[in-house]
Image (cartoon, rainbow, N blue to C red):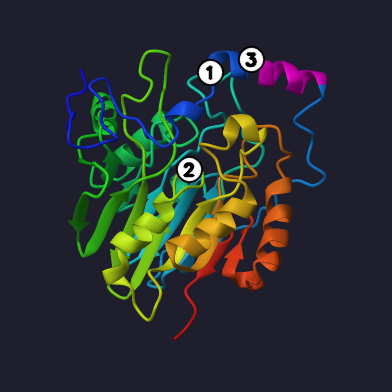
Amino acid sequence: MNPYYDPAKTHHTPEGFHDPDVEAGRATLRDIWEWKREARREGKPHPPKSPTPRVDPNLARIAGPETSATFIGHSTVLLRIGGLTVMTDPVFSKRASPFSFLGPKRFVPPGIALDDLPAIDVVLISHGHYDHLDRSSVRHINRRFGGRTLFVVPLGVGALLRRWGIGNVIELDWWESHTYRGLDMTLTPARHWSARSFNDRNRMLWGAFAIFADGFSCYFAGDSGYGEHFSETHERLKPRERNGVLFDLALMPIGAYEPRRIMKEHHMNPEEAVLAHRDIGARRSIAIHWGCFQLTDEALDEPPVRLAKARAEAGLADDDFVALPVGGSWWRPSA
C-alpha cells in the first residue's frame, strides 16, 4: 500500500505513483530484450568520435558569492544561488549501478571530486534511479558536512535516505514547496518513472524542481520525456515571472534518447529539449544527462552536436542553451 496515497491526485495509485499520460506507451520487458538484441546485432552503441570534454574548475570562485552553475557530470550540477550552495542528483561513483563491478561505467571523472566540494547546503534529488541517486555519494556528503546538508526529495525517497542514515530530509509531492534560508523549492511534474529493484517500481515519486531565490530562479528538469508538463509548469508559476522570464537558468537533459520507441516517453532528445527550454520560460539553459554514462544507443558525443543544430534551427543564440564541458561553469552575467 502506498502510504502517501491520495485518491484526489491523478498521479497517485494505491501501489505507488504513475503518469497517466504515458501509461499506455510504457516499454515492456519484452521490448527491452528486443532492443538489446537489436543493439548487439547492429554494434550499438557506436563509440564516440571524441571524448567528453573536461576542464579544471575554478574552485575558489565557485565557492564565492557569485551566482553560478558548475557541471560536475551527468545530472550532477553545483549551484551557487541565493548565497547557498545547492547540488542536484549527486553521483560520483564509477558506475551508475548497485554494484561496483557491473552496470554503466563512468567515462569521464567528476568535474569536482567529492572531497573538494565546498560545504553543501541543499541537495535536490529528482528520483531514485541509480544514475541520479547514488548511495555512497549522498552518504559521503551527509557525513562530510556533519548532517547539516538538507536533502529535498520526492515522496518515498526520504524513507530510503533515512535507512542510509540521512535524517535531514524533506519530502515533497508535485506542486508542494519548501523554503530554506530564503530559497523556495517546488517539486513539479516530470514524465518519468522510478525503480531500484524489480520489487519497487514506481513506489517512489519523481519530479523536477523550480527554485526561486531573491533576484534569481532556476529550473532543474531531472529526467523527463517531453510533454505538456513544461507548459503547465510555466503557466502555474507565471505569477513569479520577472521581466517576462520565469527562470533565469534551466538545467535540461539532452541524452539517453535512442531508440526512440523505447525512450521517447521518458527521455528527451536534444530537439525536444530545445522545445522544453522555450516552454518552461527559461532565459538560458545548460545541458545535463549526457557524456558520462553510456545508457542508451546514441554515441556519448552525439547529444551536443544535435543540440547545436536544434538551437540554430530554433533561432537561439549560442549561449542560450549550452553544453558545458565537465567541470565547466556558467556565471550569471553582470547586470
Magenta stretch in the rendered image? 34-41
Q: Looking at this view, is 323 or 70 the one in front?
A: 323
Q: Residues within 10 Å of mark 3 (few under 14, many from 20)?
A: few
- Disc 1 is placed on an element classified as loop
- In the figure, 177 relative to 127: above or below? below
Residue 4 placement (x, y as % from top left): 18, 30
Q: Which residue is mark 3?
A: 33
Q: Is residue 9 magenta?
A: no
Q: Which residue is mark 2?
A: 224
Q: Quadrant of the C terminus?
A: bottom left
149 is higher (above) or lower (below) than 81: above
Image spot of residue 52 (x, y percent): 70, 48
Dot 2 and dot 1 residues touching (CB under 8 Å): no
- The answer for how far apart the CA atoms under marks 2 and 1 are is 18 Å
The quadrant where residue 325 appears: bottom right
**Label 3 amino acid?**
Trp
Is any atom of residue 23 visible in this view? yes
Judged by depth in the image, the label closer to the viewer, 2 or 1, is 1
Please indicate whether residue 87 sits to the left or right of residue 181 in the image: right
Label 2 sits on a secondary structure element that is loop
